[in-house]
Amino acid sequence: AGVADAVAFVADGRFHPESVMIANPNIPLYRYDPYGKVLTHEVYEHSRMHVLRRAAVTTAASARRWGVVLGTLGRQGSPAVLDHLQRMLARRGLPFTTVLLSEVFPAKLAAFPDIEAWVQVCCPRLSIDWGHAFPVPLLSPYEAEVALGAAEWMAVYPMDYYSKEGGSWANYAEPAKRAASRDRCAPLGRAGGGCAGCEAGECEDD
């Protein structure tokens, strides 16, 4: 299939159209509101979103204690992605705390004042839309991989969490793809507070 020239979205809100625009920054999107019977050309602040999210990733890259949130609302949380992130943090030699939450609010995460960065396995849009409201970085799995040195920042923000062709951070990623991503996540040295077991080849990853 070729690249579309435009996208037409029938909806009375912007949540899902925004996801389409994030993943397709160069394709115009028109939204038709069937209730108001209005057709609008929608726009999204891609530059501002990238600046905010890259700033959060940069801050998280120096974090020495992490928290991992697994969402329990509906089918948002993925135990496979959770396991992948836990192994990645362990390989990096970073201590972490895992919590299960049905909803993620700043006040709930504030109960863990020693956590310097969070990664949430819930809704990908949570970090994009509300990450700036949290006192410490709240990353998506993709952003966490960038912060941990396993992935590069992408010019087009990936919205492939539910795609079978998605990245190693996606729900349906093949185990080999996730293992390759962890292999790119080099352990920290002892001077940086890293894991001596990783350096000795004693940490179990797979």
Image (cartoon, rainbow, N blue to C red):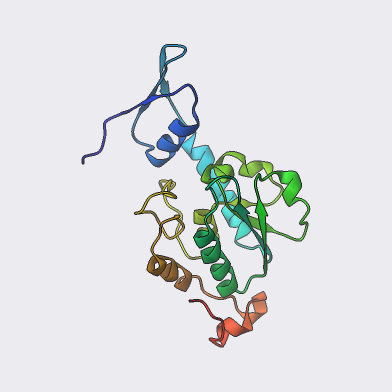
| Pick the front one: 114 or 170 | 170
Estimate the x, y position of residue 49 in percent, counting from the top left. Answer: 53, 40
Horizontally, is 177 left or right of 104 in the view? left
Estimate the x, y position of residue 8 in percent, counting from the top left. Answer: 34, 25
Farthest residue, direction top: 37
Q: Residue at x 58, y 45 (%)?
A: 127
- Residue 7 quadrant: top left
Farthest residue, direction front: 74
Residue 148 in view, yes or no: no
> Relative to residue 71, is residue 179 depicted above or below?
below
Q: Which residue is drawn at 38% across and 63% down?
A: 174
Q: Quadrant of the N terminus?
A: top left
Residue 105 in view, yes or no: yes
- Residue 96 quadrant: bottom right
Q: Which residue is drawn at 52% across and 46% down?
A: 124
Q: Residue at x 21, y 39 (%)?
A: 2
> Relative to residue 110, is residue 148 depicted above or below?
below
Tally of numbered tags: 0
Estimate the x, y position of residue 140 in percent, counting from the top left. Answer: 54, 52
